[in-house]
Image (tube, coloured by chain):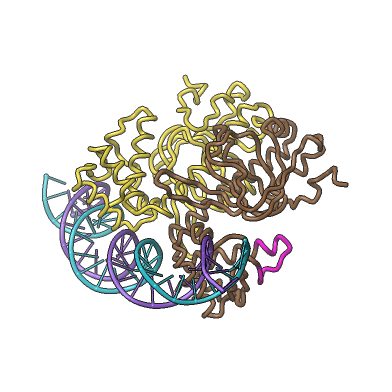
Chain colours: A brown, B yellow, C purple, D cyan
Amino acid sequence: MQDTPCQNCIVKPFCFARALDLLDYRQLSHKIYERRDFLMRAGDDFIGVYALRSGAAKSIMTIEGGHEQILHFHYPGELLGTDGLDNQHHVNDIQFLDTSNVCFFSAVQLDELLAKSEDIRHSLISAMSKEITEDHKNLLNVSQLSGAQRLARFLMDHSKQMSSRGLSPNCFDLVMSRTDLANYLGLAIETLSRLLNRFQRAGVIKVNQRRIDILDHKKLHDHLTTDT
Amino acid sequence: MQDTPCQNCIVKPFCFARALDLLDYRQLSHKIYERRDFLMRAGDDFIGVYALRSGAAKSIMTIEGGHEQILHFHYPGELLGTDGLDNQHHVNDIQFLDTSNVCFFSAVQLDELLAKSEDIRHSLISAMSKEITEDHKNLLNVSQLSGAQRLARFLMDHSKQMSSRGLSPNCFDLVMSRTDLANYLGLAIETLSRLLNRFQRAGVIKVNQRRIDILDHKKLHDHLTTDT
DNA sequence: CGGTGGTTTGATGGTATTCAAATGACGTGG
DNA sequence: CCACGTCATTTGAATACCATCAAACCACCG
């Protein structure tokens, strides 16, 4: 039986697995969410952070005027809810894209862990620093790259990420809708659709619904550097 | 004499002032930099973090292909160099826009502080969480707002920031060049120039070199919500 | 077998970029 | 103190890219 539910946790950028010998397992709460469920909404009180054990989610920022921006797609091993660490309120929505299993660490537990373990401190700080750098890369992409380049970069990054999760880097199903991906890339859905089509006709990828086959990594990389 | 050099430090989002009773003042090193000097370059080893006491700086990310993106303009009270906390190397350049005074905390000192003080832990984590949220807002701006809206938002934010630093919110000198500002906003310099001109003709602001007078805050806000 | 939501395709227009040249600010040396 | 050179900024005209609007198409589900 699974008294140590985190032992299957995929340790990627951040995982509290190392913390387990500092905490009573039974204090940890786990929960299953379904597609379209929200883990939290902007404005909610911050009560702790969450590790995504399985499934997928997206985080969304909204501003006055109805503009929404998808900030991240989250995959197993990632830490969710850190946006509430600033002033005890969450600023983004987090919504699941698939059935997901999530592990909760209360603010109190987190504080204890941070006090006790230098490893945990470094893990959290390192994870946040890494997120900042990734956000900066995203900004640069959206700000300076053409639509085709943004898509190429997304596909390359995603391919690499799939392989680091032990999955095929050449053939995968996207968890997000076209609308979500377009929003994330800062494009209109129609533009994204046209770009996917263009890449397909160029023999770079094969598209079938949410299934993507990457046929030519070199061509994909060329799209990033030379545009078109 | 100034044996406690941080006592004038403007405590804004983050300041180590509270740490001073945990550290020997004389361990802290201070340094003056001139305009155009670099605090660090991408790839440099991470040796510690810096508090900006006076002056101004910009941080810049570069990717293969020569694309550069200004990520932040930094003002007194801010913590610099946290991009190196992830894997012991800096990923961005930080360059001064003006003569600046900087206070250095070595990685060892920082670790000590984090171990000793819950306040410091929360300050750092909170500051990083806040930066993430601000980066997200920037992404949303660049991704979804028109050029005019981006400029309007920048001017409003800057005005507010000036006032929170105890300076006039209606009349200020920008520390950065047009080129820098355009890059930051994700626009061509020509476009930025035209937008400034347009705002001026609309009676929203008065522009003279780097001096900006905000004549009509309401109109400025309207530009943000209704575009044009 | 309709219906619905999501996706694709087509035609058009607007916004911002690009290229080019003019203008202006500023610092240096004569 | 002014002339000159350099760099930054502005202005103009043409173009490209992407968004928008509109309609068709398709997968999925009851």
Residue at (73%, 34%) from the top-left corner? Answer: A113
Query: Which of these two is toward me, B43 or C11?
Result: C11
Magenta-drawn segment = A161-172
Q: Residue, x 36% and y 44% (percent of image)?
A: B154
- Identify which residue, A163 or B10, lies in the foreground: A163
Relative image position of residue A193 (x, y in whole percent): 49, 69
Query: Which of the 4 image quarters holds residue A22?
Result: top right
**Closest to the observer: B124 or C25?**
B124
Q: Nearer the viewer, residue B20 or A129?
A: A129
Q: Quick check: A42 left or right of A31?
A: left
Height in image: A212 above or below A62?
below
Residue at 79 percent of width and 51 percent of height: A8
Q: Position of residue A64 (x, y in %)?
A: 41, 43
Q: How many marks?
A: 0
Q: Residue at x 47, y 64 (%)?
A: A189
User: Where does the image place residue D21, in percent across and percent down from the top left?
Assistant: 34, 64
Q: Quadrant of the C terminus of chain A?
A: bottom left
Percent of width and height locating residue B170: 27, 34
Asked if residue A123 is among those painted magenta in the image, a careful observer would answer no
State the residue lying farthest toward the right.
A1
As drawn, A223 above or below B26: below
Quadrant hosting residue A216: bottom right
A166 inside magenta stretch = yes
